Image (cartoon, rainbow, N blue to C red):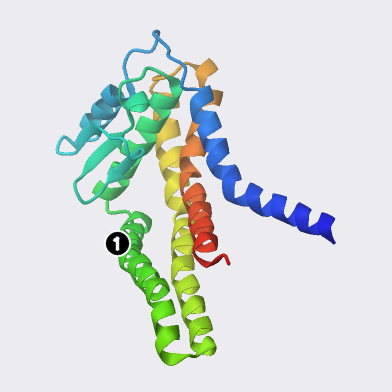
Amino acid sequence: MPILVAIGSILVLSLIFGPGLWIKHVLRKHGVDRPDLPGTGGELARHLLDEAKLTDVKVEPTDKGDHYDPTARIVRLTPPHFDGRSISAVAVAAHEVSHAIQHARAEPAFMRRIEMVSHLVWVERLAIGIVILAPIVLAIMHSPALLILQVLAAMALMAIGVVVHLVTLPVEFDASFGKALPVLEQRGYLSPQDMPAARSVLKAAAFTYVAAAMATLLNIVRWFRP
């Protein structure tokens, strides 16, 4: 039995931490400076946006992770990808610009994601509120059954975040392989020899939301561990 528990724990930890560690490994592996590339990730992002006639969408550096902000209409890239000349920088920039294109075209899947994500903040706040109030309610009501119901309700609410992250995967795969990859490949922004590495980076970029979902699961475990 202890062996089974140990194996189960390893599998769970691999599921939670594995995607994030793999993404960091891929981005680091292909983030080596390449002076032969014609521009930085930030410069490519600006160029691709201008080509798509999205001149009103800005490009700026951030320390909060690569992403496209649909509310502010800004493509934000971390410093290694904004200023860097690497395959990771180029591929990630193309991926995030693809989200801006999805938004500009009002593609249904992307618009649904915006709506779902906009509700997540309130869902998470409600879940945290339930957790914070649970001990107070227990002290007043003296009802373990009510406490269990509160815990289950909070866990269900936080699990909604996991579901949202997972159902948005088609949006991420479209950004990486439906839009970014053809642009990099067909327009010659990267050489044929660099395309396998670019595909790896684009796959990692697409699975960023899987890593976010696993992080949400970890948060649920932290909230309710004994």
In which quadrant of the rendered view does residue 45 lie?
A: top left
Q: Amino acid at mark 1?
A: Ser
Question: As drawn, which residue projects farthest toward the front?
Answer: 139
Residue 65 shows up from this direction: yes
Residue 203 image point, x, y percent: 52, 38
Label 1 environment density (alpha carbons within 10 Å; few <14, some 14–19, many ≥20): few
61 shown above or below 145? above
In which quadrant of the rendered view does residue 168 lie?
A: bottom left
Mark 1 sits on what residue?
Answer: 118
Q: Residue shown at 26%/22% (left/top)?
A: 43
78 shown above or below 163? above
The count of marks equals 1
Q: Quadrant of the C terminus?
A: bottom right
Q: Residue shown at 49%/71% (left/top)?
A: 155
- Label 1 secondary element: helix
Residue 140 image point, x, y percent: 40, 89
Residue 199 shows up from this direction: no
In which quadrant of the rendered view does residue 80 lie?
A: top left
Residue 134 image point, x, y percent: 43, 78
7 shown above or below 193? below
